[in-house]
Amino acid sequence: MPARLDHLVIAADTLAQGAAWCERTLGVVPGPGGQHPLMGTHNQLLRIATVNYPRAYCEVIAVDPQARPPGRRRWFDLDDAALRQDLRQRGPRLVHWVAQVPDVQAAVAALARLGIDRGTPTAASRMTPRGLLEWRITVRDDGARLFDGCLPTLIEWGDTHPASALPDSGVTLHGLAVRHPQAAELREALDAIGLDQVGVEGGPASVCATLHGPRGPVRLQSGA
């Protein structure tokens, strides 16, 4: 199985705000997700799969106010003060993406050979109505996304992928591209993990996703 886009990360100050943003922006309400005890976060999910992105989904994620402090930096820069303030002031937005790889340890080693510390593969799980969902995901000690969110976090799923339980949402992903001042280095990093379906351009840092749904074509873009 080649490396490929797994999901888009929509960060929100609260999960309720994230769900409202999703309905307002995409025309649909995300479905149930769950809690992440390891990170003190919770999420809701929305299937956006197409032939080119067969397991793609959107993850709307926020710090869980009911969870115990995780005792570590949360993933996706969710403890970063500037990002937290931005989410409170501007509202939910696309901040990152995650790539599925067949062997996360090998992918981390490939990036390390380029001098990139993508983080230690960490075992994580959450309970679902269909049983325990398990995966290994790269999380740095500082929780950083890297390349301003343009270099994906890496994930290796266990026996079950969450997209298999998600209903069709009416929203589909039709393209993903990233832009960064260090475009050559970013392209080299994506090639190193075998991910060639995502375009890379030079310019101000941003992740751009094109989706179609009840609201028509929608372009989501990270960055300022």
Image: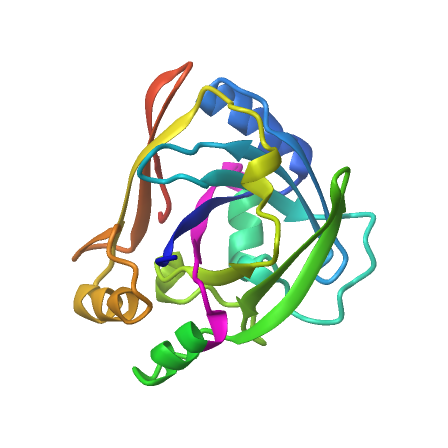
Residue 99 versus residue 210: which sits nearer the camera?
99
Relative depth, front residue between 216 and 102:
102
Instruction: Answer with left or right where residue 11 lies relative to residue 118.
Output: right
Magenta segment, which residues?
89-105
Q: Quadrant of the N terminus?
A: bottom left
Q: In this view, does 14 lie above or below 119?
A: above
Tell me which residue sits at (50%, 67%) in the image.
Answer: 144
Q: Nearer the viewer, residue 52 or 79?
A: 52
Q: Where does residue 18 sit, x and y in percent of width and height?
A: 59, 34
Front residue of 153 and 61: 153
The chosen color scheme is rainbow
Q: Residue at x 46, y 19 (%)?
A: 170
Q: Which residue is drawn at 61% across and 54% down?
A: 159
Quarter occupied by residue 109: bottom left
Residue 209 place in picture, x, y as percent: 33, 39
Q: Is residue 51 left or right of residue 99?
A: left
Q: Is residue 84 left or right of residue 94?
A: right
Task: Estimate the x, y position of residue 181 in percent, counting from the top left.
Answer: 21, 63
Query: Is 6 colored magenta in this rendering?
Result: no
Q: Could you tell me if residue 121 is visible in this image?
A: yes
